[in-house]
Image (cartoon, rainbow, N blue to C red):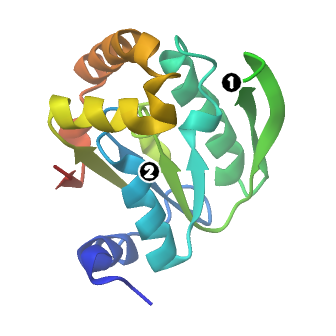
Amino acid sequence: MILHRYDAVVRLINGRQPACGSTTVVAVDGPSGSGKSTFTDGLAAATGARVLRLDDIYPGWHGLAAAPPMVARALGDVAVDRIGSVARWSWVHDRPSTPLRVVPGGLLLLDGVGSGAGVIRPFLSALLWVEASTATRKERALSRDDGETYAPFWDVWAEQERLHFRSDGTRHHADLVISTG
């Protein structure tokens, strides 16, 4: 069943051809706390898509810039119908963990800051940008894990986002902008 909230997005996706071999890849990008994961979960439920969450691969709190090239390498394999692989990050042990496998075919949603980066865009069929006010985003982000985990790193992560989005211009390349608050 397609949820009404996602009808326009599903139509957009259905109107696009796969740009990554036999795989239609859609990025859901935007700053932390904007509602990307919630939106992605609903879109996945509406479409039956698989989800690759960049939260699972950022190599630590200073690792935003490293994630897009890692995803692009995995998608390079997927584009030629090979299984891609990307290192999972263990936040508990602060080191790489078991690799994530990215299987070709169907619809794949990328969820996370940097998922629509320039190095990834050649593999994308669509780029969705999710945004909310800074106050709303910070409140949402710090409410995760009671704020204990994220609070000390909010400024560190926000500065990485600011630099990334300024140099990459991700929002400008979005096919659709979604405001969540």
Q: Secondary structure at mark 2?
A: helix
Residue 65 image position (x, y, % from top left) = 49, 17
> At 39% across and 40% down in the image, what residue appears?
116
Q: Nearer the viewer, residue 156 or 129?
A: 156
Q: Which residue is mark 2?
A: 37
The amino acid type, in three-letter code, at marker 2 is: Ser
Is residue 101 or residue 74 the one in the foreground?
101
Q: Is residue 63 left or right of residue 74?
A: left
Up-down: is 79 above or below 143? below
The residue at the point 79 percent across, 52 percent down is 83
Q: Quadrant of the N terminus?
A: bottom left
* Number of other residues with Cα within 10 Å of mark 2, as a class: few under 14, some 14 to 19, many 20 or more: many
Residue 125 seen from this side: no
Frontmost residue, 35 versus 72: 35
Element type where label 1 sits in the image: loop
Residue 165 vertical placement versus 17 (above, below): above
Which x, y percent locates residue 45?
50, 74
Q: Amino acid at mark 1?
A: Trp
Return the residue found at the far right. 98
Left or right position of 74 against 63? right
Q: Is residue 48 left or right of residue 14?
A: right
Q: Residue at x 46, y 37 (%)?
A: 144
Task: Provide the residue designation for mark 1.
Answer: 91
Q: Which mark is residue 35?
A: none
For residue 36, side relative to residue 77 (left or right): left
